Amino acid sequence: MNAFLPVMLNFFMSLIILFIAIKVYNIYRRKYLLWFVFALFLIPLLFLYSLIEILYLSKISPYAIVAYPAIIIVVEIATIMAQKNLFSSLKTEEAEEYKLLLREDIALIRAFEKIANYFIGRISTLIGIKNIEDVLEECIESYPILTGCYIGMDEKLKTRAMEENIGEIKEENMERLCEAFSYLLTKLIDLYAAFVPYREIVEGVEKEISKIEGKIIKYFIPFVLFKIVLEPFLRECKSDELKSLRLAIDIKGIYINRKGGIEYHKIYRYDVAAREKKFVKFLERMLTVLGKKGELEKNITEIFRKLPNNVKEEIYRYEFIKKLPRGILDEEKIVLMSKEKLIEELIDRKKKLEEAYARLAEAKLDKMKSNFVDIIAHEIKTPLTSIKTYTDLIRKGKLGRINKLQKEKLDKVAKNIDRLTKLIDDMLQIPSIDSKELELRKEIFYVKDIINKILDDIDEMAKEKKQKIEVNVEKQLTIFGDKNLIEKAIKNIVTNAIKYTPEGGKIFITANNEGSYAHISIKDTGKGIEKDDIEKIFEPFYSKEGGIGLGLAIAKNVVESHGGKIWVESVVGKGSNFHILLRREK
């Protein structure tokens, strides 16, 4: 009975640990965690078996004890597998993180996370982290899309689990994210405003807003307009003024609370034009109620002018400021109208200059290429052709009979001559890319056009090996770059896929939009690439199959000179998947 009690306690403790491990796995869904859960699942079984062994089995057979080392061995194996998967996931984490960051929705979540943590870091010392956790729980209850967000041990908001749970968010659903996080930010600001003057809050938030990427700043414009531009004035209103404002400003999607805080989060349920309309309507009614004979308009103008540059660029680049009431940003409105005419003229002149430079660069480049080709042709290819001709004559017995050994050696010579010829041809295709000249050759073109051209070129090669090529390319997907060089890079990878895929295999070419990048994937069902070779395959002249090894080096050179990224994922025996990321626009 003395041994029974500690075994029972250990059994229940191991169950608690297993429960916690399962909760962690449900949040992060990693394969290595699953192995750990399996190992931890065996521990309670071990203690349960101990109880059965103490009570019954020890009386029946002395060999019951053999089960203990067997279970321990399985636990050890599961732990080793967990560690192996953990190391493997760490190696691929950087590439996965890079792909995640290209997604606009992930960038948006992380921007909101940073701003929320700015407030949490200041509020937690004043009211304690428990109150902030309660606010977060309330927000998650109102907006389930926030499920997975939590306050970590470092007292900061964590959103990584949420990112993985929601999957990729489509463009039309980005507003759901904005509404949910804006609701959270409004709650945090109200808490902070109870301790700190609102003008001080605005100064701090502006610094955080200035760090937001240009591609997602558009989603923060309502936050800036309501919480930074207008709310400081409402927070300073007297109680009777605030009461009049609350009655006068009865606009769907916007609410003024009793402290003067603007709850604007529901405005994301409307399109951009409707949001602008509602803001202007709010501003007009606010000016009517507060009056102050132009002083308020002047103060609002000053706040607009002090906004971070990334916000001003977003606001000023379209018609929004023209819709603002008279007295607000009047000078900017005049400048904007003048700018529009000037920009039209500049665009026209720029176009003409680019055409002139392009013609000049093309002429210069053609001349350099022509000289280089002439040198190669005369100095290398001419003697090589003569060597090949005489070798073929000897092999065929035209210059006298040869024995079997001589023919075998000459066959090897002929094979090496062909390899050397191919090497020269490939060397001529390695682009010597000058960044200035490349900029002049860049244009926006459709990915589908170059894929179709590549398919026409390699059609016979694929048919010879009875291979099937499946293509899935977004119709309007574009790339900004040198069309010929990018076509060459992609063609080299597709040709490689055909070469290393067996007869009857499949090749999949896909291309889709990933934020400001085009993501092209060439996947095959070939033999795959060994882990040790994955980094080497992009080096010039590296080949394990007797080839020259320049195709992938050329592809890497072209992609990286365009500011893109190229990498490969491969499983030996199952095939390879080459990825290319290139900018969609200028």
Image (cartoon, rainbow, N blue to C red):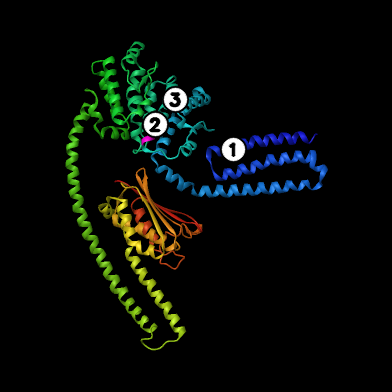
**Alpha-carbon neighbours of circle 1 within 10 Å: few (<14), some, or many (≥20)?**
some
- The answer to whether mark 1 and mark 3 are in CB contact below 8 A is no
Task: Identify the residue at image location x=59%, y=47%.
Answer: 82
- The answer to whether mark 1 and mark 2 are in CB contact below 8 A is no
Residue 235 visible in the displayed image: yes
Residue type beneath disc 1: Ile
Residue 372 in percent (x, y) is at 28, 67
Q: Is residue 136 left or right of residue 301?
A: right
- Distance of label 1 from label 2 (alpha carbons): 31 Å
Residue 361 in percent (x, y) is at 22, 57
Which callout, 1 or 3, points to the residue nearer the camera?
1
Q: Is residue 288 magenta?
A: no
Mark 3 or mark 2: whose residue is earlier in sequence: 2
Task: Identify the residue at image location x=32%, y=65%.
Answer: 428
**Dominant secondary structure of the magenta stretch?**
helix
Q: Which element type, helix, strand or loop, lies under badge 1?
A: helix
- Distance of label 1 from label 3 (alpha carbons): 32 Å
The numbered dot on residue 178 is 2
Residue 519 visible in the displayed image: no
Q: Which element type, helix, strand or loop, lies under badge 3?
A: helix
Residue type beneath disc 2: Cys
Residue 335 in percent (x, y) is at 20, 32
Task: Identify the residue at image location x=40%, y=20%.
Answer: 197
Q: Is residue 318 above or below residue 33?
A: above
Q: Residue furthest bottom?
A: 400
- Magenta-colored span: 172-177
Residue type beneath disc 3: Leu
Q: Which residue lies under the disc numbered 3?
A: 188
Q: Which element type, helix, strand or loop, lies under badge 2?
A: helix
- Distance of label 3 from label 2 (alpha carbons): 15 Å
